Image: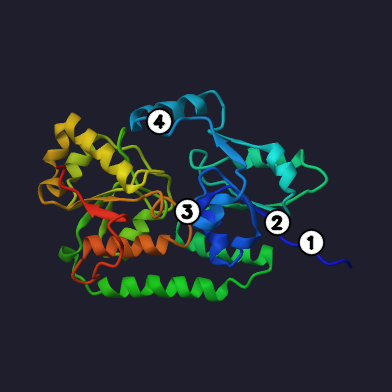
Amino acid sequence: MPPAPPLRLVSLLPSATEILDCLGLTDRIVGRSHECDYPAAVTDRPICTAARLDSRQPSGQIDADVHTLLNHALGLYAVNLDQLQTLQPTHIVTQDQCDVCAVTLAAVETAVANLAPCQPQVISLQPNCLGDLWADLQRVGVALGVEAGPIVAALQDRVAACHQKTVGLEPDQRPTVVAIEWIDPLMGSGNWIPELVTLAGGQNQLGQMGQHSPYISWETLLDTNPDVLVVMPCGFDLERTRQEMHQAMAQDSRWQQLGSVQGDRLYLTDGNAYFNRPGPRLVDSLEILGEMLHPTLYPRRYPPTAWEQFRGT
């Protein structure tokens, strides 16, 4: 039997790129999505996707454009078939979790069907909670011939260490928390975020573990009135999140009615680097939540570019 060809990997999802890096396969990545930016070593790899919307627009317009594209049965992202043809990958790692987050599985399968002479194996990820992340790491490792067990165990040890710090807290020592995934219109954070909030010693509100992030009304947010509000817009870094929050608070006085805002417990994050990506840095996200919710238990280690307390000034 002839030897297997060397791995030539294309990642069409930022979290998949981070998973490949975690498995020691960064040098085997020959192509990436237009959003894959970590680790920095991948940013010189050819780009294989493009967005059909302008992410530089305000949050409200981005949301409207997303719905327009989806209502017309158009994907938000396109696959560059010519680039894939040139790269001749052995494997393509993509996702089937969210049509808004990255290129759809159907679009990838259509592209693969038109590739020649290679017929790459498609590895599709569908993470909804931490357990799915561990399973994805193992599955990608098996598909690519890498032992993922020790890597998964090390990440799980960090999770356990975080949880151990807060496991003895009484209910009144656990702040109520609302995580915001989109500012205009308001969306709560679902999927893995409720699990991270609980592990970090908070009481999650307005999002269900393993379920897609829900739209929420202002009435619901005001009625919930959480102790802590964590803003983590999907795809936005900390600077962009800060800009959006300044604008939102200038335009809508209801933000000032929230106890979390009045009590200086409104936190902004680099959601694009951490909370939005279901890869190894979800463990970093858990540790960041710990720093926000229980600073006496979690001395700060993460840099100012990761998260900040926001006072609206």
Q: Position of residue 23 (x, y in %)?
A: 57, 67
Q: CA distance from mark 1 to mark 3?
A: 33 Å
Residue 307: quarter of image: bottom left
Labelled pair 2, 4 in contact (Cβ < 8 Å):
no
* Residue picked out by circle 4: 62
Q: How many marks?
A: 4
Amino acid carrying label 4: it is Ile
- Please tell me whether mark 1 or mark 3 is closer to you in this view: 1
* Element on which disc 3 rests: loop
N-terminal label among 3 and 4: 4
Q: Residues within 10 Å of mark 2 (few under 14, many from 20)?
A: some
Q: How is the image coloured?
A: rainbow
* Residue picked out by circle 2: 8
Amino acid carrying label 3: it is Asn
Tell me if 54 is positioned left or right of 140 in this view: left
* Element on which disc 1 rests: loop
Q: Residue furthest front?
A: 44
Tell me if 35 is positioned left or right of 301 in this view: right
Which mark, by number, is residue 128? 3
Q: CA distance from mark 2 to mark 1?
A: 9 Å
Residue 86: quarter of image: top right
* Element on which disc 2 rests: loop
Labelled pair 3, 2 in contact (Cβ < 8 Å):
no
Tell me if 237 is positioned left or right of 264 in this view: right
- Please tell me whether mark 1 or mark 4 is closer to you in this view: 1
